[in-house]
Each structure stands twice: as C-alpha cells, then as structure tokens.
Amino acid sequence: MPTAQPSTAVPAATSAQAWLARGMAAHQQGQADEARQAYQALLAIAPDHPDGLHLLGMLEAQFGDGDQAVTLLSRAVAQNPLEPMFHNNLGNALLQLGREDEADACYQRSLALDPKRYDALNNRALLMARRQRLREAEAAFLQLLEIAPGFVEARQNLALVCMRLGRPHEALAHCMRGLVTQPGARGLRELLARAYMHCEMPDKALEVYRAWLEHDPDDPVPRHHIGALEGAVPERASDAYIETTFDSFAGSFDQTLGRLDYRAPAVLGAAVRARLGEPQPRWRVLDAGCGTGLCGEHLAPHAARLVGVDLSRGMLERAAKRPHYQALHQRELVEFLRAHPRSFDLIASADTLIYFGALQDFAQAAHAALDGAGWLVFTVEAHDEAEGAPEYRLHAHGRYSHRRDYLQRVLLEAGFDEVQTEAEWWRHEMREQVQGWLVAARRGRLPAADTATTAAAG
Ligand SMILES: C[S@@+](CC[C@H](N)C(=O)[O-])C[C@H]1O[C@@H](n2cnc3c(N)ncnc32)[C@H](O)[C@@H]1O
C-alpha cells in the first residue's frame, strides 16, 4: 500500500485551498461555471474535502440539480457529521426533491447539534407552512423571532404565513417591523405592498412602490406596479420586469405553483391532445414562455422536436434539467416568433400571456410562425365581460386579464380560421380559484395522421 508522502501532500493541500478560494470567489459573484470548475478541480485533488463537497452541493442545489446536490451534501455530512450547517443544507436539497420527511430529519439533526441554529429553525417552520400546517408554522416563526428579533427572513416568512391565513393586517405589521431592521429589503417591500392591496389600501401600496422606485430607480418591479395602480397600463410587462421577477422566482417556482394546485400545463396538455389526437412524436412544437418546463411532459409526446423560449435565464436553467426539450432559447417570445416564420405546427403557451395586455403583435407573429397549418393553444386570465370593461386589464398583482371577445377578435384579425375559448381555472390564490380562458386558434388544417412531418425547426 503506498503511503502519503509529505512532499506531495503539502502542494496538494495548498492548491486545494487555492481552488476552494477561487471557487468561492466565483460562486459569490454568481459565476456558476467557473465556481463549478474550481470545486471540481479541488475534489479531483482531495475527493473527500468536506467544504468542497458542501459548496459544490450548494451550487448544484442553487442551479436546480437536486439529485446531484443531495449526493454531494450527503458525502459532506459523512465527512463531517458534527457540522450543523451541512445537515441544514442537505435538508434544503432534499426538500427541492420533495423528500420532506428526510429534510425534516436533517433540520432536526442540525438543531440537535446546535439548538440555536436560526436557519434550521426557520427552515423547519417553512416546512410546516409548506405542509399547510400554517398555525404551527406561525408559532414556530414567533418562537424563533423571540430569540432572534432581527432575523428579517423569518419576519418575512411570518408575514407570508399571515397573508395565507387571511390576516393581511398582521402581515402589514410584520413587514413594517422587518423594514425597520432592514429598510431596503426588496421582498419585504413587495409583500408590504401586496398586504396593503389585500387590506384594500391601494394608495398605501402605491406609496410603497414609489418609495421603492425612488430608492432604486432602475428596479423594474415597482415601475410595473406603479403603472398598474396609476392606470398607465403598458401594452405588456417590460422584459426587465419579467427577467427580474422570474430569475428570482425560478428556484421556488415549481414548489410554489404545486402548492397552489397549478393546473394550466395539464389543461393545456389535454386541449392539445383533443386537437392533435393520440400523441405521436411528429409535430414541430414551440413552448412559448416555457419557464421551468412544466408543460414539457404534456407537449413532448406530440413533438418530433420541442423547442422552448423564455426571457428568464433562471427559469430556462430549470427547464434544461428536464428531458423534454431539444432546444431552449433565451429570448423575448414575439421576437422569437418573428424570427422563425413557418417553423411550427403547434405553438403552446401556459400562463405567459398573462404578462401581455395587447395581443395583436403576438397573434400576428404566432400566425406567421405556424407553417401554413397548425394550432396556437394558450391560457390567459379572465375578467368579466360587462359592458364597458376594457379589453385587457393590468391588475395590482402585476398580471393582466383579458376579455373573451377581445381574444377572439385579435386572433381572427391576425388570420386564424377558427378560435375556440373555454372557461377554466388555473390555480388557487388566497383560497379562490383564478379564472381564465383556454384559447385554441386554428390556422388551416394539419395533415392527417399518416402524413410524414417535415424538418424540425428552431
Ligand atoms: C408563470 S410562468 C409560466 C411558465 C410555464 N409556461 C408554466 O406553465 O409553468 C411565465 C413565464 O413566461 C415568461 N415570459 C413572460 N413574458 C415573456 C416574454 N415576453 N417573452 C418570453 N418569456 C416571457 C417568464 O419568464 C416565465 O418563465
């Protein structure tokens, strides 16, 4: 058996430290590829390096590879079972995979090693909220805030639980306390404005957004909401608003939407199947606003080639982890459609045109992107069609809703031959169903099932 030679061990350790430092610096600057390479180089030298395993595991968790994260973090824990942080972070990675009981066991192990570990206490309370045990979660956050009153993240989580419990006035109070500790906290400002809206105090919400914009004039989020509240409705949400909102939402999107009984991808999938028939992998399909790829499993069975397009890099990184897409593009979707005339047989879009008010440009670009014949199937939110209601509305929550007759008119004017609309609901919000329209617009007629398809696009 060869023994370790001090002469080689010293340079190896030195360069392991150097790779660790390089990885951490890149990681902190958000340079994921550089950080990954550095951690991998470190682990090539020292395969059981606990910090290397831990940090690479954290990086993988951050970028959506939960399985890999769990493997690496479990190895870090095995190397250093007395480090409470490792148990806590393994818990978070397990939670990404929906392994709630195991995650809870990790948080408990972390707390057994250090009962005052605030992040593990916070994560346990979050897990309770995730399991709909809202009152228990509330008690746990309150207990935590008693020992750590300045823990802003826990204060924000408690405010969110109050909102979910239908007590927006209490949420307001917690947001304000949190903002005393951390005046510029983005999440708290956003929640505070939402809580004011739920308390039917739009003027106060507007004040929050204005103060936020004054503090950070480049932030597209308050700008978007000020437009909604002041009635200066843009034709669609700005690219900057979409990117900022969804890049920061990407990590928790699937989990949050799951909790809200989100059903747009499944309803969209059923609508596609009703029109294209039994799945055959023969069509050129675009998922417009693919997000993390939740529609992928419903569209892929029909697709010779499935292409996704989205503005948010964070969302696309998640979609790339799914097996369904042959290509993913980071681009504004109308621009993408215009750049791909006569390229698709089916364009599908779930919960994305809720960020568009005017739909003329989209409808025309989609019509031109279908290859002579095909279907455009999408979901939007609905508002009542009472006389005088605008064709589309931008709501204080930041999303648009549409009138059914507007959808039909715009699509027919763009050249579609037939437009079908069905009333549906998409998810729960504050215990209410969010109502919408499922829209299917036909251009020409697709060839019958025994005709071969043409080359793939995108
Ligand atoms: C609510 S998510 C829905 C994602 C996915 N379709 C689903 O059902 O899970 C909306 C997505 O649309 C994207 N999006 C919104 N407006 C867009 C635009 N103009 N161009 C490209 N992507 C857009 C967002 O980045 C986000 O990923």
Image (cartoon, rainbow, N blue to C red):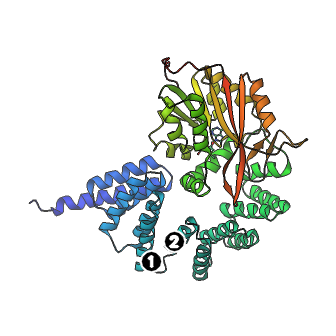
Q: Is residue 68 left or right of residue 206?
A: left
Q: Quadrant of residue 391?
A: top right
Residue drawn at (49%, 35%), measured in percent from left and top? 300
Residue 187 percent location from the top left of the image = 66, 61
Within 10 Å of disc 2 (Cα), the crowding (few <14, some 14-19, many 20+) is: many
Residue annotated with mark 1: 111
Give whichever of 382, 290 is nearer the camera: 382
> In the rendered structure, are the residues bearing label 1 and label 2 in contact, judged by CB atoms less than 8 Å apart?
yes
Residue annotated with mark 2: 124
Residue 92 percent location from the top left of the image = 47, 63
Inspect the image, locate mark 1, and give the three-letter code of the amino acid beneath it.
Leu
Give whichever of 185, 158 is nearer the camera: 158
Q: Quadrant of residue 424?
A: top right
**Relative to residue 351, is residue 84 depicted above or below?**
below
- Between disc 1 and disc 2, the foreground one is 2
Give whichever of 232, 351 is nearer the camera: 351
Inspect the image, locate mark 2, and give the three-letter code of the amino acid beneath it.
Arg
Q: Quadrant of the N terminus?
A: bottom left
